[in-house]
Amino acid sequence: MKTVILSILALIFCLVAVPAAAQDDSEAPNVEFLMTPEDFRASGLDKLSDAERAHLSEWLERYREGAFVGPEVNKPPSEWTEAEKSAERNFQIVAKVVPSFRGWSGKTTFRLDNGQVWQQRMPGRLSYSGGDSEVVVTKNLMGGYILEHVESGRSVLVKRVD
């Protein structure tokens, strides 16, 4: 077991230390150095300008060092900015159900004209035979979503499925 662990550590050292030693420490790793010529061409990186390749190389170095800052998924509310908190409080989608709105009856799926698909989460029924299919989706205090049919004023808890 000890031999396996030492072998793995040696492999990791080779993968990290050898490429780093092969280039100047004052520069970010050149993206061309990190790929085979075939992969470099196949990925289209040979079409980038020198400045674009340099920027990509610098980004790779920041990523490798753990300094990459990208979009945070599921950031806890305690870490939200004021703009994010405001956007969350004011969350609202106004759309029309397509092809037509006939109400809901349990697990009804609502396809909206903006491409989103929502599904009823709680039991309940609403029969509707009018012509207006406008709905408003908002977020409630518990973090769930409410779909309200504007003309009837009735609402139902929903979840986004697409």
Image: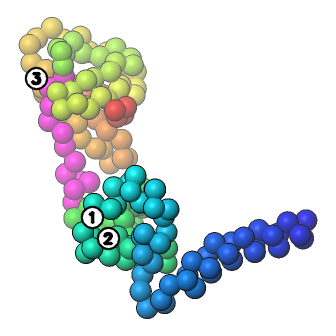
Q: Quadrant of residue 41?
A: bottom left
Q: Nearer the viewer, residue 67 or 84?
A: 67
Q: What is the three-letter code of the residue carrying label 2? A: Arg
Q: Is residue 136 above or below residue 80?
A: above
In the picture, measured across the screen, residue 36 lies left or right of residue 97, that is right
- Give the extent of the magenta segment: 86-97
Q: How many marks?
A: 3
Q: Residue at x 42, y 75 (%)?
A: 30
Q: Residues within 10 Å of mark 3 (few under 14, many from 20)?
A: few
Q: Residue at x 32, y 70 (%)?
A: 53
Q: Which residue is mark 1?
A: 48
Q: Quarter holding the N terminus?
A: bottom right
Q: What is the three-letter code of the residue carrying label 3? A: Glu
Looking at the image, the residue that sits furthest to the top is 129
Residue 60 on image: x %, y %? 42, 71
Between the residue at mark 2 and the residue at mark 3, the CA separation in whole angstroms equals: 56 Å
Residue 80 on image: x %, y %? 33, 65
Q: Which residue is mark 3?
A: 151
- Ranked by sequence position, the earlier of labels 1 and 3 is 1
Can you see residue 45?
Answer: yes
Question: Residue 53: which disc?
Answer: 2
Q: Secondary structure at mark 3?
A: loop
Q: Secondary structure at mark 1?
A: loop
Can you see residue 85?
Answer: no
Q: Secondary structure at mark 2?
A: helix
